[in-house]
Amino acid sequence: MRAELFILALIVGVFTWVFRFFPIQFGLGRKAQATRLGAFFGAIAPSAIATLFIASILPLLGHDGVKNLPLLGGIAGVVGIYWWKNSTIYATVAGAATFGLIFGLIDFMH
């Protein structure tokens, strides 16, 4: 593993922990949304999730379009099932299964 990738993963992990620990530690859940700090954490959570998502898929993207198909299929599986069922569990399993199926098909064809 390259040192840059390890450092990036470490930074993303630390910020993920911080974004999850402090709202829980200081009672900034749904009932605290009315406060300024609660609203801040409520607004920053989606952008933090999007940033972590982009940081985690950037190393996976390549110049070969065929190698990107499992990743794109997995993302489509997650988004599609979440939109349909509104369930994080089903969406996660569907995304992983879609990724695995497409990856297996591509590997089988080569």
Image (tube, rainbow, N blue to C red):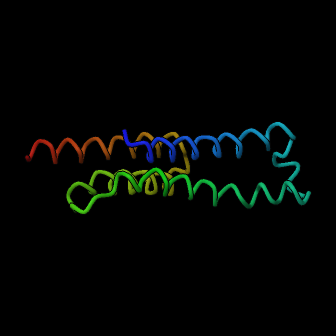
The x, y position of residue 102, in whole percent, is: 24, 48
Residue with the most extreme left position: 110
Dividing the picture into quarters, in which one does residue 101 lie?
Answer: top left
Direction from residue 79 to residue 24 in the image, left or right: right
Please tell me how many numbered marks the rendered image carries.
Answer: 0
Please name the residue shown 64% across and 58% down the image: 46
The x, y position of residue 59, in whole percent, is: 38, 52
Depth check, front residue: 14 or 108:
14
Please name the residue shown 28% across and 58% down the image: 62
Direction from residue 95 to residue 87 in the image, left or right: right
Direction from residue 71 to residue 104 in the image, left or right: left
Quarter of the image that includes the N terminus = top left
Above-or-below relation of 41 to 12: below
Direction from residue 10 to residue 36 in the image, left or right: right
Depth check, front residue: 54 or 43:
54
The x, y position of residue 9, in whole percent, is: 51, 43
Above-or-below relation of 6 to 80: above
Residue with the most extreme right position: 35
Depth check, front residue: 85 or 60:
60
Dividing the picture into quarters, in which one does residue 94 lie?
Answer: top left
Please name the residue shown 87% across and 48% down the image: 31
Please name the residue shown 38% across and 43% down the image: 2
The x, y position of residue 43, in whole percent, is: 74, 61
Residue with the most extreme front position: 3
